[in-house]
Image (cartoon, rainbow, N blue to C red):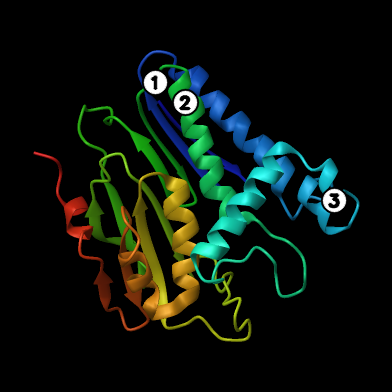
């Protein structure tokens, strides 16, 4: 069973196989709606909008908001400040954490219903488990950022989470916190694989903000691999990335 819905300003696709799959899918979609209601900076009624307007003190924050802020602070420290949820205008936008965090939590919701074969794709960031409807390993394609209907790499994630940061779909929405005026145009995309989609997502955002040296940053982090494409169409990958380009025998 597969369905796609527009939530959180992006297409979210869920594919689930096995007993209880409808319940699992609906529970996950309901969760994504709840996350959007709490964290969307485009909704005046959201908790993050109320925080940005100074209407909520820290004592009034939800447990979910505290958790996301804690992860953001940790990511900022681990990335030498290249990940920062504070925007140049002084507002707070935790979307660089929220997407991966929400996908990871939605995957846990699906798993708790007893479904072990699923794939959740939210705006190109992916959590998966088990096998597809044919009983085969899940495979995921990396799109050519210069020709979006073309797949340039096929990956077999083997249970790892995947996240891609780039400018070729959403434009220049990531910035360098150390130099907000600097144009991030030297690379066009970086795809990161990690033990879960949250780890992949938070470090993909930081690596993209670093520019060309982001791939070396990922190389130094255990259990993360990456594939980066620069503005000239030249690709670079970490030393362990090739492991994910072949299915498990």
Which disc, if any, is residue 136?
none
User: Would you place residue 164 above or below residue 172 in this image?
Assistant: above
**Which residue occupies 59% across, 80% down?**
178
Q: CA distance from mark 1 to mark 3?
A: 37 Å
Circles 1, 2 touching at the beta carbon (< 8 Å): yes
Report the residue that reaches farthest toward the left.
249
> Closer to us: mark 1 or mark 3?
3
User: Would you place residue 175 above or below residue 36 in this image?
Assistant: below
Circles 3, 2 touching at the beta carbon (< 8 Å): no
**Which residue occupies 55% across, 49% down?**
99
- Residue 157, percent across and down? 27, 45
One can see residue 93 in this view = yes
User: Would you place residue 115 above or below residue 238 in this image?
Assistant: above
**Which residue occupies 37% across, 81% down?**
231
- Residue 17, percent across and down? 35, 23
- Which residue in the protein does label 2 denote? 110
- Closer to the chain start, of discs 3 and 2, is 3
- Which residue in the protein does label 1 denote? 115
- Which residue in the protein does label 3 denote? 50
One can see residue 9 in this view = no
Q: Report helix, strand or loop for mark 2.
A: helix
Q: Report helix, strand or loop for mark 3.
A: helix
- Residue 146, percent across and down? 36, 73
């Amino acid at each position: 069973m597969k369905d796609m819905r527009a939530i959180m300003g992006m297409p979210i696709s869920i594919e689930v196989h096995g007993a209880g799959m409808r319940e699992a899918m609906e529970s996950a979609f309901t969760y994504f709606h709840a996350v959007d209601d709490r964290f969307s900076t485009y909704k005046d009624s959201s908790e993050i909008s109320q925080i940005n307007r100074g209407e909520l003190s820290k004592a009034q924050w939800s447990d979910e908001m505290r958790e996301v802020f804690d992860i953001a602070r940790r990511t900022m420290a681990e990335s030498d400040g290249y990940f920062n949820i504070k925007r140049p205008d002084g507002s707070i936008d935790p979307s660089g954490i929220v997407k991966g965090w929400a996908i990871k939590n939605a995957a846990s919701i699906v798993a708790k219903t007893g479904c072990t074969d699923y794939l959740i794709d939210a705006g190109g960031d992916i959590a998966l488990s088990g096998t597809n409807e044919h009983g085969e390993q899940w495979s995921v394609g990396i799109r050519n950022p210069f020709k979006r209907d073309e797949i340039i790499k096929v990956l077999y994630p083997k249970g790892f989470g995947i996240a891609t940061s780039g400018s070729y779909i959403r434009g220049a929405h990531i910035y360098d916190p150390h130099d907000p005026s600097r144009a991030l145009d030297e690379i066009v995309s970086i795809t990161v694989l990690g033990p879960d989609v949250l780890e992949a997502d938070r470090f993909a955002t930081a690596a993209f903000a670093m520019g060309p040296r982001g791939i070396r940053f990922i190389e130094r982090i255990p259990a993360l691999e990456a594939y980066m494409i620069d503005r000239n169409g030249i690709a670079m990958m970490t030393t362990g990335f090739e492991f994910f380009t072949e299915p498990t025998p």
